[in-house]
Image (cartoon, rainbow, N blue to C red):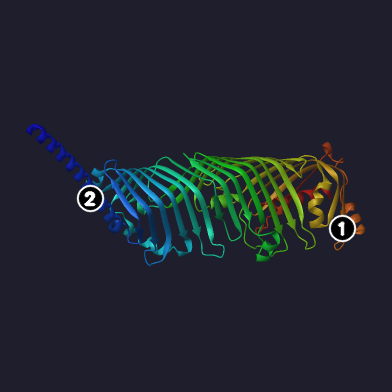
Amino acid sequence: MTTTLRNTLFIILGVVIFCIAALLISNLIVKNKVEAFLTNDLPPHIQNSYDELSVNMLNGTLTLKQALVAVRNQTNDTIHTNFSAEKITIEDLDYWDYLFNDLIHFEAIQLSNATIEHHKNKYNSTKDSTNASSSKLKRAFLIGNLSVDNTTISMYDGTSDSTALYTDRLMIDVDSIRMDSQSITEKIPFAYGAYTVKTDTVFLKVSAYENMTIQQLELQQGALDLKQIKLFTKYSRDKHAQLLEKERDHFDLRIDSLQLAKIDFGFTDDTFFAESHKLVLSNPKLDIFRNKLVADDPSIKPLYSKMLRELPFALTIDSVAIKNGAIAYTEKVKQDNPGGTITFSALDAQIANMSNTYGANTKTEIHIDAQFMEQTPFTVDWNFDVNDQEDRFLFKSDVGPLTASRLNKFTEPNLGVKMEGATNKTYFTISGGNEAATIDLRINYDEFKVTVMEKDEKNDKNWFLSAVANLFISKNSDDSENDFREGSAQVSRVKNRSFFNYLWLNVEAGLRKNLL
């Protein structure tokens, strides 16, 4: 081997050894800096640990295995949140930004098999919020893409059935995340770009009495798609009534799918806003049971315009569509029977301007088509102005042919009244506000009569009361012009009753004017 060749080999070998040494030293330096950051630079109420930290300078990858994070209240040692992940992979660290610009900049972060557990009852929000300035980050974060795979989230509230939220197999993908000392003090502590969220199991405790489950959730590019939603009272009807101190509906709502298009949300100053171009509910089925044997709830029930107006956030939904819905309402007023039921089926509805952000004179418009008691066409046109402090509304309805006996499913167990005959066509318009309303009702009917039942004998007729009642009821509407009877009535609102009770009081007053 010549001297020149030998020297060349030594030089090459030296360069290789230098590069290897430089790589090892660089890996060690970066690893030490990361460890120092995790140890010293995180806020003091955030503690972390891990089994293994590795750095590969060749491909710019940092890997943490079996990572654990515990978050405490800032004023005491109570841990309210735990996070763990089998593996956290951080790709393509920008060394220049890290070493010279105080910026932790990663091309991507991947979390595998993560678990998040939060205890709401242990979180001291008031005291923590007063120390927000101490949570400012010493370095800004920039993440090109965050990918979370197969994650489980659990939230507890400290009650006997303490699970407030649960979801597993959660997948999250978010681009362009940036968090710095300024953003971390905001309501949403980071900025972000395109995002996707998917899961196939969601459980949510809505209240002490109701739960919600969702079989599938997908949120992507401003569009939300939910499948198989259930919102229901978690107790049986009898158990629910035993637990109540005052009246509260027992209900079961099931929706095949819910879709929201063009979603936007965030904060304007300190006010949360939520917007969507369109909400679509497919095949919602609602079963409501009201036990009138429970003490009344004396609280004032606001009309829908006031409810929207006084929401604690800004809501804007341009349009809502309900497709093929169904409602069954059962009311129990006597101990010895299960109650009477009225139903609406094949219900389609369109709602425009469901919002509390539009200007004056932009009304919420509602149109409904349905089948009442299975066979009677029923249409509604209803509008109100959310900005109107008097909560004025206009409610128009067109009711098709109805065999009176179909109403006996409701009137017989609740009112002790059976009806015969038929209404051929009914129109009514209710215009009113928060204090009172006026109804104009036109009805065409034939061979109408009632049977009043004995109070203590469900199957026996009270002949005297039935005869008296039918003396005052006009048997047919034939004696009025165009075969319709017409009448108007005024009704004062009972403010501790619902809007639908308000409607019923108006319809009842209108029927009395026409039938008696």
Q: Quadrant of residue 402?
A: top right
Residue 313 percent across, percent down from the top left:
49, 51
Residue 498 at least partly seen: no
**Badge 1 density bin: few <14, some 14–19, many ≥20, Cα 10 Å:** many
The secondary structure type at the circle numbered 2 is helix
Q: How many marks?
A: 2
Residue identifier under label 1: 453
Identify the residue at horizontal 49%, vertical 57% (top origin). 155
Label 2, label 1: how many angstroms apart (C-alpha)? 91 Å
Q: Residue furthest left?
A: 3
- Disc 1 residue type (three-letter): Met
The secondary structure type at the circle numbered 1 is loop
Residue 211 percent across, percent down from the top left:
59, 55
Residue identifier under label 2: 29
- Disc 2 residue type (three-letter): Ile
Of residue 445 and residue 252, the one placed in the foreground of this image is 252
Identify the residue at horizontal 76%, vertical 52% (top origin). 341
Residue 370 at least partly seen: yes
Of residue 279 and residue 431, the one placed in the foreground of this image is 279
Residue 86 percent across, percent down from the top left:
41, 52
* Left or right of 495 on screen, residue 406: right
Residue 237 percent across, percent down from the top left:
70, 59
